[in-house]
Structure formats: C-alpha cells, structure tokens
Amino acid sequence: MSDEVRDDGFDDLLDAVADGEGFYVECDEGHGSLPPRLACPQCGSQELSEEPLPESGEIVTYTIVAVPTPQFADDAPYVTAVVDFGPVSVTGQVRGVDPEDVETGQVVGIDVDETVTSGDRLLVFERR
Amino acid sequence: MSDPRVAGVGLTHFGKRPERTGREMFADAGLAALDDAGIDPDDVEALFYGNFMGELAEHQGHQAPLMAEAVGLDVPATRYESACASSGAALRDAVLRVRNGEADVVLVGGSERMTNIGTAAATDALSIAADDLYEIRAGITFPGAYALMARAYFEEFGGSREDLAEIAVKNHEHALPNEYAQMQQEITTEDALDAPTIADPLGLYDSCPITDGATAAVVTSEEYAEEHGLDAQVAITGTGQGGDKMALHDRQYLSRTPATEDAATEAYADAGIEAADVEFLEVHDCFTIAEVLALEGLGCYEPGDAIGAAGRGETTRHGDLPVNLSGGLKAKGHPVGATGVAQLISITKLLEGRHPRSDAVSDASTAVAHNAGGTVASATVHVLEEVGR
Ligand SMILES: [Zn+2]
C-alpha cells in the first residue's frame, strides 16, 4: 500500500492499461491470468507470454458496495464487477454510470482511475 | 486404523466482548474442553490452533504457544491460518495426527477477537482473505465478494433475495434456545428484506455478525478413549480438504464451489458414506448464499436446487435435512478462527443429545461439518458419526 514502492507486475499492468496497452499473461495452453506469474495458475505451465488484453469485455457479475473498507470510505456506494475479457477475467469498479443502471452482459472497456478516498490507483470499467 | 473420538468440547459465549483478550477466551474454551473430557491434562500431546486476524486485531502473531500456555499446557503448538477455515484446517491435521498413531490426545480449537477494533477495521481485516492486488484494491469487501457470487448464482440458476431471507429466518429460529449464540432473536422475512443493504443484493440479515469467541475440543484415539473409560460417543470418521483459485475472477465457476466438492468427495470416501447418508449438517453460512453453495457443493442438492430449501422447510429443524441447528454462523456468530471447531462442537452435542436442538435429530447418527475460507478458496469437510460407548 506504500506510495513509494511499486508492486512488480501489478503496477506494470496498471501503467500499460493507462497507456491503452493493457495485457494479460497467457500460457502455451492458452490459459489467461494476471501478472506477476511465473507459472500458469490453471495448468502450471511455465511457458508464458504477455498478450494484448482485448479492447472490451462483458460484465458477468457485479455488486453495489454500500459498506466499504476504510480505504473506500468516501467512494461508497460504488460498483465492483467481474468482467470477462475472453482469455482472462478482471475485477474492477464500474465508473461513469448510475449504479442502478449496471447490468450483467453490458460491454465495457478498461482503464485506470483513482479512488476518491485516498487517490490510490485502481482498475475501472467504462461502458462501450 | 481406528477413528479418532471427540472426548470433550468447550466454548465461550459468542458475541461482543471487545475487552476480552484472545488468550483469555481460549483459556476459557480450552479448560472447559479438558474438563468435559475428564482427562489428565498432562496426557495432551499437542495443540492445533486456528486464528485468522490476530496480527490486525491484537497485534499478536505466533499465537499458538501463547494459547497452549493459556490453558496450562507445555506442548508443541501450531497456529493454522486458512481465513475462516482456520480451525477446520487445524482439526483436519489433529485428526490425521491421531489417526496415524502419532498422538493419542490432542487439543484443537481457535479463537478470534474482532469487535475491539470496530466495524470498519474489522471489515478491512476480513477483506484480506481475498486477493489484495486484484480484488481488495478494486474495493472488494467480504460481503461484496459473496454478493458477486450471489448475483452470479441468481443469473445462472434463478433465485431471489426472498429465498435468501428464508435462510436467515431459519438460522435465527434455530439459535433461539442456544445460550452460546450471539443472536437469540427471531426475525421475519420482512425484517430481512427491509434491512439496510451491505453489498447489493446482500443485506444486513444476509450476513453473519462480527463476533468474539473461542472454541476447543479434545480429540483422542479410540484406544485411549477405551483405556480411560471416556464417554466419547462421537467419532470423526472422515476428513477432506479442497482448494480453489484465490480470486473469483480466476475461477471456473462463480456460482459453484469446487473446493467444497473436492473436500466432500474426499471426506465421504474416507468415511465410507455417500451424500445421501448425511442426516444433518453444520455448514459455513457466513452469508445466506454461502449456505446454498455449501449444500450444493456437499452433494446434498444438485446445483441450482438448494436456493429454495429453507423456504420449502427441508433444511429447518422440522425438515428431512436440518442445516445449522446451532444457528449457523449467521445467528450463532462467526469468530473466524474458532468457527470450524464450533461446528464440531455443535454436531458432537447434537449427536450426544445434550444440545438444545438435539430433539430435531434424535434418531440421527451421521452428520457433516463444512468450514470454508474466504470465498471458498479453502474448504474442509468432516464426517462425524455416533458410534456408542
Ligand atoms: Zn495454462
């Protein structure tokens, strides 16, 4: 949680997503996962490469969080969703839409934004 | 190879006791268990101890030796941390140790002090059972994670908040005569549906409370129980454990729990039973939807069928398959690291006829305890059978 020390892999991904060049980790069997990875979490393969994250994905489930942790005290209520990008799924917050209007099946793109409470970076989804 | 026996059990009242330290609570539970077993404390060979958030709540790591000392034991002690399945995991290793003949008497249990840090900090502490980088930093809370699973379940199988409310109503009703329960309070479906939302679609009454408490049990070999003439009628005949990916988005299923399925498969085979042989259960209902996922993962219902079980009356104390007669985590309370052994205690008392809800299962002899960690990235299942004296 330190502002000073980066988390390799995670911060690399957020930098890339912010630059419009999101990626995921793919093994030689085609399983997708999020970095850092030295082995595929699905099959254990160590033959891994970084592949471009698809432009858009679909909301498969979401919740409107009313009671947050202190790190999100001023953000609530907010929508956290799991979005299926095909080879990989990602958890993030849905921004730019009334929480009541979020539905499963909606198509979203991915970006990086900041939390209201602390200004920490986070992955966000926006309607396409 | 013989089946380990539950020789004695002990627990604190579950509830809000912010001023009580973990060590005092565990001493209370541990001494009660030793007393209940009626054994010489010098015979205890090891402590298997579950705790989840001791560093955050009490600034106390390395808790196991402290807890052995608290009950006056000078034995090797190890802490198990598998989030909410911590003492289920501790129990599993205690059972294996005894069954393998490497110990005759072990103490197993857990404690958790939670309310002393307040609701916001406890919410934060509970959240770290999820993936910090990719879930917590996206605002996932413990209720939020189960809300994601609940919505995924509704989308795949159907079901509604009303169905979940029936589970809360049932478990509150079950807890009414349980003097150890945090909530001895009857509620209606309207109460549950009208309660504030925590993480849509889950409301306040879909969630277990934040709880202080401790539990302990003396597990012995069958031979030790016979030699010492112990009144230990309940045997642990099966044990199993399963795992899954940590983050929900990395899982194959959002509305099923393969860790429970794997743990159940192993435990049933170990005990030589099938799901149909199970007569009642204590399952991990940290949230109402979790009871549904558990019953399906345990093979008691097909996927999609357990959502209406409470509403249909099947899992109430009058039904064919009573679930959470103790009140469950929902009403009994959920002192995280103590919960797995709390389930063992409830089942032992129910089978022995000394639980206030024993009447509901007076003819039963086979029961299952299901303990889950996080969003069921960890699960343990134990089969308990009444074997007589
Ligand atoms: Zn793979």
Image (tube, rainbow, N blue to C red):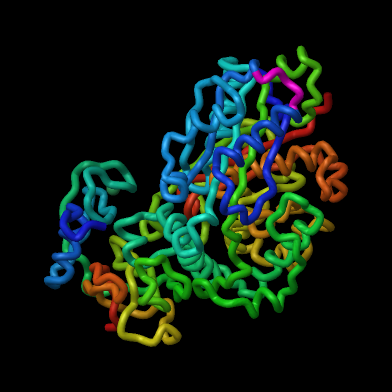
Q: Nearer the viewer, residue B147 or A44?
A: B147
Which residue range is magenta in the image?
B37-41
Placement of B246 over or under B277, stated as above or below: below
Along the line of sight, the residue nearer the viewer: B80 or B313: B80
Do we see residue B261 in this rendering? Answer: no
Q: Is residue B321 above or below residue B45?
A: below
Instruction: Please report the residue visible at 46 percent of the width from the left and 64 percent of the height from the top.
Output: B120
Query: Can residue A69 be seen in this snapshot?
Result: yes
Quadrant of residue A121 in the image? bottom left
Q: Nearer the viewer, residue B288 or A3?
A: A3
In x, y percent, where is residue A102? 41, 82
Q: In the image, B159: left or right of A5? A: right
Residue B145, magenta (yes or no): no
Q: Classify the position of the C terminus of chain A by image quarter.
A: bottom left
Residue B4: quarter of image: top right
| Residue A105 % position (x, y) | 40, 77
Q: Position of residue B73 (x, y in %)?
A: 58, 23
Indicate the position of residue A74 as horizontal and vertical percent values: 36, 76
Outermost residue toward the top in this view: B227
